[in-house]
Image: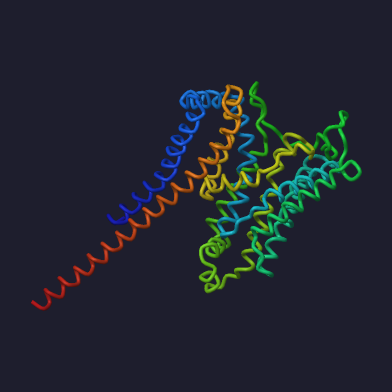
Amino acid sequence: MSRGTARFDKERLILAVAAPLLAVVTALVVTALIIAATGKDPFAAFSDMVTYGSASDSQVYILNKATTYYLAGVAVAVGFRMNLFNIGVDGQYRLAAFVAAVLGGALTLPGWLSIPLIILAAMATGALWAAIAGILKVTRGVSEVIATIMLNAIATAIIAYLLQPEQLGQLDNAGTLVSTKPLPTSSYFFTMDAGPAGQVWGFIVVAVLVGIAYWFVLGRTRFGFDLRTVGQSESAAAASGVSVKKMVATSMIISGAVAGLVGMPTLLNDSHQYDNSFPVGLGFTGIAIALLGRNHPVGIALGALLWGFLERTTNHLEFQGYDKEILGVIQGVIVLCVVIAYEVVRRYGLKRQQQRVGAELAAQASAVRTEKQEVAG
């Protein structure tokens, strides 16, 4: 390895570490100032968050939440790598979870058969719902942002209608909770016993497999290369023989299929039914986590764990006298700091690269002049 290459790799490594480090430090400083502005001690808050978040039951909670958040982050990241903004993950996963819950409640098959069918139904529903936006984009030029926002609203209306007791829903004994027919116990996904701390959802294994598949397909296959090429430059991709429209539609379908998995940890490991308390907004959380993780599978995992940690510990802070809105403030500050920090580091890296190329060109020009002088002499 040449000295220039070694220096370049070293600088790339430093810049890669500098971006998240700068983001974390800045976020901590800004968050501390915000907490101090409310009249509370920020250092006491941070200490309490670390202590409470380190408890075994909190770790189980964080892992379970991170499983869902990770799937949402990957679903969004697939679109981001194609330069597509799939805001429709929220509607895709909720509609997919509803369809999967209805199917699961109607099945009387053994678990080894019913669970894969439920998961496949969820993925197919998410993929089909996302495909609508993809087809509209490649055939009519409709922005995926507008299309997916509208599809979110349509999905909400469809679920609200079908969840009525007169349709596919049913009331609980208290008459307050409307839900689909509960899944039979044979369709429950496995859990891992963590003792008094609780149960770790087994769907974390599926999330890990999804992350590995995401890394392999995008980073080690021709399809992934074409997908990333289209995201960086559609004209360059088209010139190399890649069908841009086909890649756009395919990436939206894949993003929707992954989005279909987002509600599965809750359905198969927790609630075992779809009801009016089913978590909402996970698609938008996935956007923040994908940004936080820079669309990298490991980065998304760290972002999902951080989100779970913040949710667990800031909810605890509310019972310690802190304002309940502090969670949203901290999350917003972190995302904002991450975006700014990465952009600052990117621009600095680009400037350093330009300086390095300029210096090398100047050195080459100087060497050519020296050689000419020697020949002339």
Quadrant hosting residue 66: top right
Place of residue 133 in the rendered image (x, y in percent of width and height, measured from the top left): 69, 60
- Using residue 357 as the reference point, say whether residue 177 is left or right of it: right
Outermost right residue: 166
Quadrant hosting residue 151: bottom right
Quadrant hosting residue 238: bottom right
Between 226 and 155, the one nearer to me in the picture: 155
In the depicted structure, whether residue 342 falls above or below residue 165: below
Residue positioned 55% across, 39% down in the render = 331
Outermost bottom residue: 376
- Using residue 326 as the reference point, say whether residue 252 is left or right of it: right
Instruction: Name the quarter where the N terminus is drawn.
Output: bottom left
Residue positioned 85% across, 39% down in the render = 181
Between 166 and 258, the one nearer to me in the picture: 166
Place of residue 367 in the rendered image (x, y in percent of width and height, measured from the top left): 19, 68
In the depicted structure, whether residue 129 falls above or below residue 207: below
Place of residue 225 in the rendered image (x, y in percent of width and height, measured from the top left): 53, 62
Place of residue 115 in the rendered image (x, y in percent of width and height, measured from the top left): 77, 43
Residue positioned 63% across, 45% down in the render = 71
Q: How many marks?
A: 0
Residue positioned 73% across, 34% down in the render = 270
